[in-house]
Image: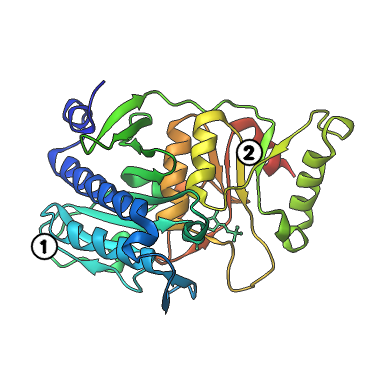
Amino acid sequence: MQTLAQVLKASNAPAALQDVLTTTTNTCIDICEALHKGSLAGILGVAGNENVQGEEQKKLDVISNDMLKSDLMNCPAVRAVASEEEDDIVPANTDGEYLIAFDPLDGSSNIDINAMVGTIFSIYHDQSTQPATEADFLKPGSEQAAAGYVLYGPSCMLVLSTGEGVNMFTLDPEKGEFVETQTGIAVAKDTQEFAINMSNQRFWSSNMQSYVEDLVAGKEGPREKNFNMRWVAAMVGDVHRILCRGGIFMYPWDSKDPSKPGKLRLMYEANPMAMLVEQSGGKAHTHTQRILDIQPEGIHQRVPVILGAANEVDKCLSY
Ligand code: AFP
């Protein structure tokens, strides 16, 4: 079995991108260690602040953000970072070649119940003689040089794409390194499993309500087959399930808060996951367009998300 370092070396990824990926994933190994210590390290619970999205920050959100920010700022290849937990972008090295946007701890409300959380990252190539600005980050997801996540579950896993398919790695805790455990991830085109937060049903569009109603109607309904439902409440866990055994995941548009067209963030949730899903043969859309084609308007922009099994995404969009 090959280590991450060996896989990267054998890939077409430029050396500077390999440095950014190595720094990011090494920091994730440190975050994993902190998570495993849990209450023993006094790092659970709330930090007492809200992030730019108006969400309560957990201590581990802040700790993970600080760890990633500080390690990436010290990586010469990094030009700037953008994070769910930072109001503005943080310029690093003007002559660095890569921009990295991340959600340091996706699903952080799961921490309190010792359930799955993860770090999601999205990397763009960008070069200039001027310090980076937010405008430099506003590139469509189709331009991502790499995307991935580290899932802190029963085992710690890295899922990565540099544009040549998707590979999965498992952390060998004794050696402190990721080892490749699965290659050529492929999402089946059809599925009988869906993931959605049903408690938002009354806020969805009538079309989305009809689609889910037909899924739930099962064999006796117009779809003529039974569907199962799963909801991890951390996108990283739900997308991991889809990459492992298929399915469709939706966080659709809803009318709960007219200022938000969706809950999930484009730059560090939807785009990296869309790249992984497309690289595995699946589809990733909003209700109107392919996620990777969206021209971002801001680093904290939110979008509706429908992703996973290609035929099922098409079916959902047909409603
Ligand atoms: P947190 O990181 O604030 O816990 O949010 C996680 C998340 O953005 C995404 O990972 C989940 O799919 C979604 O929120 C779950 O949201 P609800 O279950 O609250 O609807």
The residue beneath circle 1 is 129
Which kind of residue does numbered mark 1 sit on?
Answer: Thr
Secondary structure at badge 2 equals helix
Q: Is residue 172 left or right of residue 186?
A: left
Q: Is disc 1 placed on a helix, strand or loop? A: loop
Residue at the disc numbered 2? 313
Quadrant, the C terminus: top right
Q: Would you place residue 99 above or below residue 43 in this image? A: above
Seen at 27% across and 46% down, the residue is: 29
Q: Which residue is rendered at x = 46% and y = 60% of the image?
A: 108
The location of residue 66, given as percent across then percent down, is 26, 65
51 over 77 or under it: above or below? below
Quadrant for residue 221, please give it: top right
The foreground one among 10 and 127 is 10
Q: Which x, y percent locates residue 130?
A: 14, 66
Q: How many marks do you count on the picture? A: 2
Of circles 1 and 2, which is in front?
2
Quadrant placement of the N terminus: top left
User: Nearest the camera: 306 or 75?
Assistant: 75
Cα distance between the residues tagged 1 and 2: 42 Å
